[in-house]
Amino acid sequence: MSINSSLPKQVKIVEVGPRDGLQNEKENVPAEIKIELVNRLTSAGFRNIEAASFVSPKWVPQMATSAEVMAAIERRQGVIYSALTPNMQGFEAALAAKADEVVIFGSASEAFSQKNINCSIAESIARFESVARAAKDSGLRLRGSISCAFGCPYQGDVPLSAVADVVGRMRDLGCDEIDIADTIGVATPRKTQTVMEAAIRAFRIDGLSGHFHDTYGQALANIYASLEVGISIFHSSVTGLGGCPYAKGATGNVATEDVLYMMQGLGIETGIDLDIVVDAGQFIAQFLGRKGNSRAGNAIAAKRAS
């Protein structure tokens, strides 16, 4: 028997760099750079790219060019281009921009929900009912993202029952996929499997995804732990774009190049060309004027240059 026989034979990688990765950059990233990044990622073979966020520019000024980006990217048939939509105004903008999927979000932590949006988890999910209905009526995919599923910067531990409850609420809204997110990167492999198993009991396994931050260097281990319990969708960000706002100086999203390198080593199909992703990572890191956060990406780039 192969050592990897129990792992999924293929996985879907959702590239979140253009949205989740870039949104916290303090210096303005022009639309043409974002468009170039999305086009490079499309050519690499991703089936799902989180490309835009239709939130108020007052709160997230980096995403103010989302409509321009969505209008100019070179779309490939079969690729899902996603947009974050916090309300009906955001949904209407995403619909006009021809997003293929809209993303709604909630928290598994009551403290996080109250601190960030001044309402309970139940109230936050209820606010998305109209968006969810509109998405379904318009034939768009609907994805739900659950933050702080593994730990909260305000309350610490998050009960498994709370994670399962929010998964159930997202399921009842009609979500096609539900992201289980380690927003502050505190998860470890055993905790990851326990949380994922709770989510699996509330939603079909092929619709659950892992969104891991690498704050404590555990993201790849947590992805592997998720593979072991049958999760086959993961989020990552090219060259590790994105910081963690609750841990100063810490990295945020796990780097796509690192995830792809691990999947190659495990013999798991992704349908993505690692070399093209490395090029995309070097492109955006160079624009931002700093070295990328992907160890695999930097190693491959250095090897090429030697």
Image: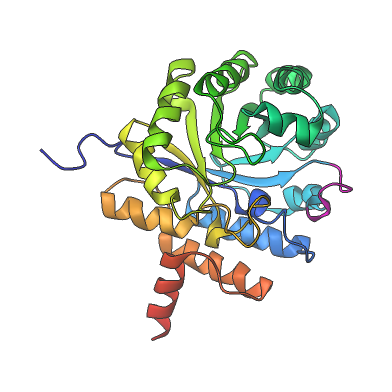
Quadrant where the C terminus sits is bottom left
Image coordinates of residue 127 in percent, x first then y, are 78, 21
Q: Which residues are magenta?
A: 56-62
- Up the image or down, 146 lies above or below 264; here it is above
Quadrant assignment for the N terminus: top left
Task: Tell me: 154 left or right of 181.
Answer: right
Query: Is the image coloured rainbow, by chain, by secondary structure, or in one colour?
Result: rainbow
Left or right of residue 97, residue 81 in this image: left
Residue at position x 80%, y 47% in the image:
67
Outermost residue on the left side: it is: 1
Q: Look at the picture and state if 100 lies above or below 236.
A: above
Q: Residue at x 63, y 62 (%)?
A: 249
Residue beneath the point at 61% across and 31% down: 146
**Residue 84 percent location from the top left of the image:** 71, 38
Q: Nearer the viewer, residue 97 or 5?
A: 5
- Residue 273 shows in this picture: no
Q: Nearer the viewer, residue 212 or 283?
A: 212
57 falls in the magenta region? yes
